[in-house]
Amino acid sequence: MSGRDPFCQPRRIRRGAALTLVFTSVLVAGAATGSFDESAGKSASAGPEVLVGQDETVAEAAARAMADGESPTEAAERAVSRSGDRWGAVYSQGEYQEFEEALDGQYTGVGLSARRERDGRIEVTRVRPGSPAAVAGIRSGDRLRSVDGEDVDGRPVTEVVSLLRGDAEDAPAGTPVRLGLQRGAHRWSQVLRRARLSTDSVSVRRLTDRVIVIRIAAFTKGSGDLVRRTVAEAPEGAGIVLDLRGNSGGLVTEAVTAASAFLDGGLVATYDVKGDQRALHADPGGDTTRPLVALVDGGTMSAAELLTGALQDRGRAVVVGTRTFGKGSVQMPSRLPGGSVAELTVGHYRTPSGRGVDGRGITPDLETDHEALERAETVLSGLGDAS
């Protein structure tokens, strides 16, 4: 396995639709939370490797199709679909390139975050400052009715994001996308040009003089070090709320680095790859005394669950919120004939106490879906008093 993180968010095989994820949220996290941020994307996985074992059937299908003059990517998709692997997927070269860029905290899009309302309408929830959407005057609360003439009402937000972003090969920065919008009774059409944008995977704010909130939207490159620096520079006595709600995962190496901010070495997780048992350990020297609350919900998954499980099992944080998603499987990408990439599940990870996460999620110490941040602040103040 290469140095890439093997834990990834759910995939779906859908040709003709661009890669819908990366830290904007998540194929499944979007479905679980009803929202999706266009800047988000896929979680990370291991780098391309030689196909072995179960994967050989996918490679063979791609090779046969290529020899017969057919699409190797479509043949591989059919093989993955028949495998019954819930998290299996096949990506074109362009899609995988987009995946790689997302791990670097970059994506091509217009700067919108959106959610699907109960009636199926797609509503803009955030407009990134300085983005094409912001320059065009689009605001939070506007309704998105169509993308390039395709009605988006009732569609999963992941598909809407796919339309907005386009395919990495066919819709690079500078390509136009026409949006149908509505504000109140006013309807209009707006042509935007996609741009290269960066994700805000980590944000920090001071809730009070004694409470700092570190929100991690996804584990992109450098996010773990940013968390570690923030903790090291935090005022003495200040507690931290680690907000992992809606975090769809990312690079596990970054999640382990983030764990190292709060642990003095030791086990973070164990995982198996085709029967080979491995372990992930925190670096020594973390802050082990500062009051800490981890805030989670149904959109917390993959590498974010790995981090949550480590902090909970080792008694380092009180976990507040709702049960996490339950994505604890390991995928490995493999290069196929023709240049596409297939990913199939090869194993699962466990928390330091040996708990399996896949299909179960992590149960918070304090379950609440109402005013969760306020509850986390209350718990944090109690931890501060106790110390």
Image (cartoon, helix red, strand yellow):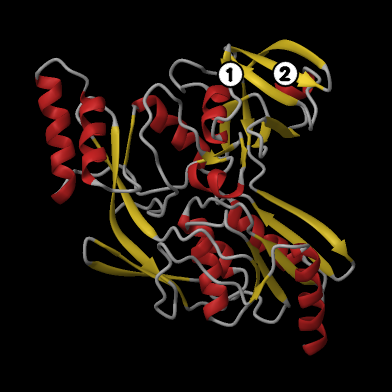
Is residue 265 shown above or below 274?
below
Q: Where is residue 293 in the image (x, y as percent from the top left)?
A: 69, 72
Identify the mark nearer the N-term, 1 or 2: 1
Residue 131 showing in the rendered view: no
The residues bearing labels 1 and 2 have C-alpha atoms spaced at a distance of 11 Å
| Res 64 quadrant in image | top left
Residue placed at 69% from the left, 82% from the top? 289
Q: Position of residue 177 (x, y in %)?
A: 60, 14
Q: Which mark is residue 151?
A: 1
Q: In this view, does 71 lie to the left or right of 251?
A: left
| Res 288 quadrant in image | bottom right
> Looking at the picture, which amino acid does disc 2 mark?
Leu
Residue carrying label 2? 181
Q: Where is residue 384 in the image (x, y as percent from the top left)?
A: 80, 82
Is residue 88 shown above or below 363?
above
Is residue 82 shown above or below 289?
above
Q: Position of residue 381 (x, y in %)?
A: 82, 78
Describe the element under mark 1 as helix, strand or loop: strand
| Res 338 quadrant in image | top left
Residue placed at 73% from the left, 22% from the top? 133
